[in-house]
Image (cartoon, grey):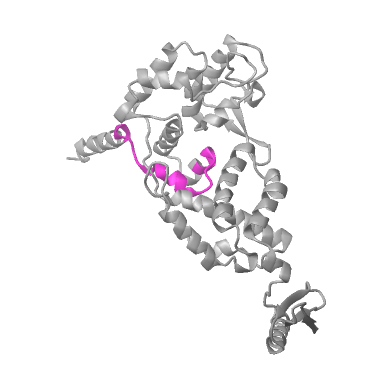
Amino acid sequence: MATIGRRIASDGTVSYRVRVRVAGEPLRTRTFKRKTDAVAWAASVEADIGRGIYSPTTAERRRTLADLIDKFLTEHLPTKANNKSAHKVEVYLAWWKKQAGFVTLDKLTPQTIAGYRSRLTSQKSRRGGTLSGATVNRHLAALSSVCKWAWKELGWLPSNPVLSVSKRAESAGVVRFLSDVERKALLDAAAADPDPNIHTAIVVALSTGLRASNIRALTWDDVDLENNALRVLESKNGEGKWLPLIDVAATELREHFERDPSETGYVFKSTTHDEPADVNGAAWMRVKKAAGLTGAANFRFHDLRHTAGTYLNEAGASAIQIAAALGHKTLAMAKRYSHQSPEFTRSVFDKLTTRMAKKPAGG
């Protein structure tokens, strides 16, 4: 039911305040200079509510995207992400707050968001070029998390407007992986390096496809040498998943343990033993330089993960199996390893040569 109140300001200006109250719905109010506009708006709101059409309340028209982002960062994000992923979300949301924080929630439409997505697309990156499609999409994903929470839990939005905004195409990027010759050179250089961690860390990375951050965080409680298994803690819920260790990796870890049989603490200890060693730090740079994997042949520690994915593909693993083994969220990420190394391609053609050389039976 709508009520309209006539109000007179100190300067004599007349206005009409509309209050629409319907059972089960929040109070909606708005002020007009003309009574005819107030009557028309009241009738429209009542009709929309009757048909189940969303009509923003006064509070929703006053709440801004900045208000929502602040509430999300304070109340929701700390319960859902680890420190590293939370920091990235905070960076993305800082952009939205700076650029569009003034936008009220009733104006936060797909069209509005698409306009800011276009700004992101043309924005310069630190290297001088434009932001990649992946970076633009990460910004959209962060905003989508905020809007989903506002919609489903707070009731501040009628839906998630980001879902109607198209994403930018993402480049698969160049998948750098080790050839057989490069792998041998790298492992030989690591074995000769004085750092007690680097050779084992590389073997574990090649055998499991784990990221440097996961390897760095490993403790001996996460290693089961009796059953040749390794536990990786999931970042979101603190639970872990167990990965099998192939014989080469299990043997390497046993030898690494025997060098410092403490049975506790980090697998890869720093010199102080109070914190884990940085397996992607100075020792890694020395080893890859000694192996000739710098300059034009540059190779990152993360490329060991790409190498593991490539080896799994060449061993006959499907995209689904690779995604499960490496913890990829989408099959598209796993399909990047569908290329074949020169060694693998040559072995295939060698089989063809052998087949072609065979004489037909009875010939």
Q: Nearer the viewer, residue 299 or 361?
A: 299
Q: In percent of the image, x 51 and y 13: which residue is there?
A: 196
Where residue 286 sits, quadrant-wise, is: top left
Q: In percent of the image, x 65 and y 61: which residue is there?
A: 64
Q: Is residue 93 above or below residue 216?
A: below
Position of residue 83 in the picture relative to residue 30 (left or right): left
Q: Nearer the viewer, residue 148 or 246?
A: 148
Residue 87 x, y percent position in the rendering: 60, 41
Residue farthest front in this picture: 11
* Residue 343 within the magenta-colored segment of the rendering: yes
Can residue 169 be seen here? The reply is no
Where residue 217 sits, quadrant-wise, is: top right
Position of residue 314 in the picture relative to residue 17 (left or right): left
Q: In percent of the image, x 75 and y 76: which residue is there?
A: 29
Residue farthest right in this picture: 23
Q: Quadrant of the N terminus?
A: bottom right
Q: In percent of the image, x 52 and y 32: which residue is there?
A: 211
Position of residue 219 in the picture relative to residue 8 (left or right): left
Residue 70 x, y percent position in the rendering: 67, 51
Can residue 97 be seen here? The reply is yes
* Residue 272 within the magenta-colored segment of the rendering: no
Q: Nearer the viewer, residue 251 or 50?
A: 50
Secondary structure mostly taken by the magenta-highlighted segment of the chain: helix
Where residue 65 sits, quadrant-wise, is: bottom right
Q: Is residue 110 above or below residue 11?
A: above
Q: Is residue 269 above or below residue 73?
A: above
Residue 341 x, y percent position in the rendering: 33, 35
What span is colored magenta in the figure? 323-344
Number of marks drawn: 0
